[in-house]
Amino acid sequence: MVKICCIGAGYVGGPTMAVIALKCPNVQVTVVDIAEPRINAWNSGTLPIYEPGLDDVVKQCRGKNLFFSTEVEKHVAESDIIFVSVNTPTKTQGLGAGKAADLTYWESAARMIADVSKSDKIVVEKSTVPVKTAEAIERILTHNKKGINFTILSNPEFLAEGTAIQDLFNPDRVLIGGRETPEGQKAINALRDVYANWVPKERILCTNLWSAELSKLAANAFLAQRISSVNAMSALCESTGADVSQVSHSIGTDSRVGPKFLNASVGFGGSCFQKDILNLVYICECNGLPEVANYWKQVVKVNDYQKSRFVNRVVSSMFNTVSSKKIAILGFAFKKDTGDTRETPAIDVCKGLLGDKARLSIFDPQVTEDQILKDLSMKKFDKDHPSHLQPASPTSIKQVSIVGDAYEATKDSHGICILTEWDEFKKLDYQKVFDSMQKPAFVFDGRNIVDADKLRKIGFIVYCIGKPLDPWLKDMPAVA
Ligand code: UDX
Ligand code: ADP
């Protein structure tokens, strides 16, 4: 029986290993983590992450061929294949701060693998890492090798949160990069055999190590670039009277472009896009390619612009001040169907509104009060470091209250900002919401999910990203 161990029981390691266990009954999978509460949660009835379909997969295999443990060294020593799925946040200090990937967690995992191993291992990079990380890791591993062979592979993850299980069951492709040596090829084949249990062979792409590492950064950069492109268009649409949904649809029907990932929004979030682009920018700069670096940097800049443009729109629409006004924030997660808030645009929007002294009443169906308060009191980039690995932050934000449902959040409010596209926000009784609000009642839809015409008929003043402006907003006198 092949034994797999995955270091890091997070959003990537947990779901990926659960699906490998489900699809490969002959493989024993153990997910290890230094965070005891996280492992306890994986072993309990309430998993530490919210992901549709995940509970079911875990229930089917846990205790059979899927295990969660804090005995990191023991399981690493016993395994044939070790996935490393630890966090690789953006560096906050020192060389490359704000751009380069912080490989502290990766390096410590690699040193531990070298220390405890007594037999040959295949070590798989699962978390996104800078190009050429494999070479550095190889050096750490082989330096201490005691006659043991370590073969390193890059197998980047392309799952998206909220649809992780579907993405893992039916991936567009699985990418495996390895050295072009006999040992490298043998390791590639061993990992390919694992995935071949459920992924058609033609979808398993094998490349060299560097192509696999770079493909992950490039894939995320391309995806984020589409969103920044359509968001840039959304600003122009608002100025010209064009409708960004119609423009997106027209563009997307060109088979060379395709229809996906063209939804204008308040901005992209998530643990990957910004981090990976900044990392790409840093790599380009280090390789003497400033023009290429600046090209990709612009994708992040447009994303920041989109968030501040949204805040400006809210403030300017509400007579140029939101001071002491109650604003309901519907949705805090970076997208629907996840409780993850890493780099969520809601953080910047809320901070922007708080900067103008608004009072915020926040509701998200999956994000805890504790998490929201932590996010709003944390500095940029600190967020990406797991909370159990950093000191507790002082959290007393007086202007913020976190509430248990959308109706409570919107009651007596002057305006509503929809920041996550949760299905339940589409189905709210907006007449009831309107009746409980201060007038004029504003809705700022950062995800284009409401029926603006219907809401206008009720009496709301509605702003939608990239759509012709509400007549009320268009005619409003400009306040200097
Ligand atoms: C992303 C990649 O899609 C995935 O392949 C990679 O492995 C990890 O990073 P994820 O961050 O989980 O996945 O979610 P994704 O669906 O890509 O959404 C990222 C952000 O872009 C979200 O904030 C989402 O709301 C936003 N988005 C997405 C848009 O604003 N418009 C779109 O059209 C699509
Ligand atoms: P991702 O979204 O990439 O899965 P997460 O932050 O959700 O990232 O998960 C990474 C996990 O890796 C965390 O739970 C963290 O505790 C764990 N981790 C970090 N360093 C180590 C290590 N040296 N050994 C074991 N687990 C680690």
Image: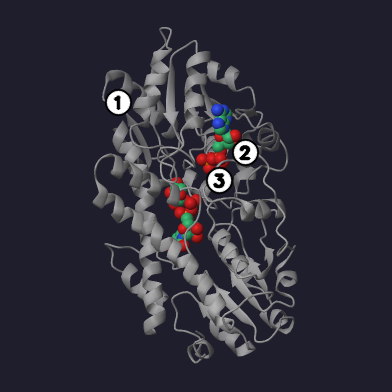
Q: Position of residue 22 (x, y in %)?
A: 56, 35
Name the foreground residue: 267 vs 223.
Answer: 267
Name the foreground residue: 384 vs 18.
Answer: 384
Please tell me which residue is depicted at 35% across the width and 54% down the height of the picture. 297
Who comes first in sequence, dot 3 or dot 2? 3
Who comes first in sequence, dot 3 or dot 1? 1
- C-alpha span from label 3 to label 2: 9 Å
Which amino acid, by three-letter code, is at mark 2? Gln
Mark 1 neighbour class, 10 Å CA radius: few under 14, some 14 to 19, many 20 or more: many
- The residue beneath circle 3 is 382
- The residue beneath circle 2 is 390
Q: Position of residue 287 (x, y in %)?
A: 26, 40
Which amino acid, by three-letter code, is at mark 1? Arg
Who comes first in sequence, dot 1 or dot 2? 1
The correct choice, above or below, for 297 with respect to 60 in the image is: below
Which amino acid, by three-letter code, is at mark 3? Asp
Mark 2 neighbour class, 10 Å CA radius: few under 14, some 14 to 19, many 20 or more: few
Question: The residue tagged with tag 1: helix, strand or loop?
Answer: loop
Please tell me which residue is depicted at 50% across the width and 48% down the height of the picture. 271
Whether label 2 lies within 8 Å of ligand 2 gets the answer no
Label 3 with label 2: CB-CB less than 8 Å:
yes
Question: The residue tagged with tag 3: helix, strand or loop?
Answer: helix
Name the foreground residue: 131 vs 179.
Answer: 131
- The residue beneath circle 1 is 179
The correct choice, above or below, for 65 with respect to 51 in the image is: above
> In the drawing, does residue 182 fall left or right of residue 389?
left
Whether label 3 lies within 8 Å of ligand 2 gets the answer no
Question: The residue tagged with tag 2: helix, strand or loop?
Answer: loop
Please tell me which residue is depicted at 36% across the width and 49% down the height of the picture. 219
